[in-house]
Image (tube, grey):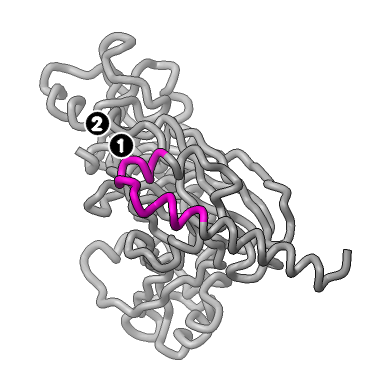
Amino acid sequence: MSKRSLSTTVGIALIVTFCVWSMTSTDASAQDMHQHDAQAGHNHDHASATRAGDAPMVHRTARGGQMTMIGSYGIEVVYRPKETRVYLYDMNHRPLSARGVQGQVAMTVRGNDKVYRYPLRYVGPQAGTQSPDYLALALNVSRIKDGDMSVTVELENLPTRQQPQATFTQTFALSKLSVAVELLDESDSPRIDRQKVCVVSGGKLGSMGTPIKVLVGGQPIYLCCKGCLGKVEKNPELYLPKVAPARPQATARASADRLVVTTATASDKTAIAQQRVCAVTGGKLGGMGTPIKMTAGGQSLFLCCKGCVGKVKKNPDRYLAKAAQLRAER
């Protein structure tokens, strides 16, 4: 078949699909539309993507991703060149943990009828950052042009009983991280100490005056001077990873020496109720007997049993951050 014939065939198929969708949606209630979106599969991908592009329920985020509001959730999909990430939020845009959530993505490239399905894996929160945990797919999509792919995300075992599942479709577009300069506050001092050097020049932070705080995709990084800002603005993806990987190892070694392990007491009842589940397994605290309490530097976390202590000792800051996130979700 010639390229011209193929384009004509695909165009006719898209028009027919759009017309069918338009007639169906005219008389459908909001609930019926949600059920239809969850079951329609590949035949509905192009219509959903077209509608999502114009609908107010989808908008761009600081990470450059697409936020889809569906039911009681806000679900953000970030399309990086070599990794696709899915973040969960409640209706007030507060982060929700993705631990225990299962899902997959179905991708359909324009001009190809084949549907490519990939499972999502869980990635825990990164110690020393404010970034929440998420689901991820390691896949190189750097050669796909914006608008040339339809992506359907299917999630199960979501946090609320009222809506344990969600399915929605987006039109692919590589995410572009936002870059914004922000004033320093008291919370930046420990982060500057951890980062130590400018991510652009490698010079010691503070050696050229007060460091510059820059939010890249909502995550703070620090520069030695304003002269380095232009390089970050030109290629934010290049500098963001330079901060992230080094943090967990450096803070974990320091924190491990300060860990105190005890059995929870009656005075911990309120704190246990706030955390609700084990910071390691996600199991309900108290389900395996009296919870284990671990404390470091004035921060505490609770575990379901002694079997989880070893994992916390290997990376304490990761699980301290996880416990703090669980409490914040209350």
Indicate the position of residue 106 as horizontal and vertical percent values.
60, 46
In the displayed structure, would residue 189 be above or below residue 200?
A: above
Q: Pick the quarter of the image with the C terminus.
A: top left
According to the picture, the residue beneath numbered tag 1 turns out to be: 323
- Decide if residue 170 is in sight here: no
- Answer with the quarter of the image where residue 29 lies: top left
Quick one: label 1 or label 2, which is nearer the N terminus? 2
Q: Nearer the viewer, residue 237 or 163?
A: 163
For the record, the magenta segment spans 20-35
- The amino acid type of the residue labelled 1 equals Ala
Q: Tell me the quarter of the picture where residue 80 sits.
A: bottom right
Label 1, secondary structure: give it.
Answer: helix
Residue 329 lies left or right of residue 163; in this view the side is left
Circle count: 2
Gap in angstroms between the C-alphas marked 1 and 2? 6 Å
Which residue is found at the position 24% from the left and 31% from the top?
275
Q: Is residue 32 magenta?
A: yes
**Disc 2 element:** helix
Report if the CB atoms under discs 1 and 2 are less than 8 Å apart.
yes
Chief SS of the magenta region: helix
Number of other residues with Cα within 10 Å of mark 2, as a class: few under 14, some 14 to 19, many 20 or more: many
Looking at the image, the residue that sits furthest to the right is 1
Residue, disc 2: 275
Q: Is residue 64 above or below residue 152?
A: below
Please name the residue shown 26% across and 73% down the image. Answer: 184
- As displayed, is residue 88 above or below residue 163? below
Q: Give the percent coordinates (x, y) of residue 107.
A: 63, 51
Q: Name the amino acid, label 2.
A: Gln
- Quadrant assignment, res 323: top left
Q: Is residue 268 left or right of residue 288?
A: left
Question: Up-down: is 319 above or below 22?
Answer: above
- Residue 34 located within the stretch drawn in magenta: yes
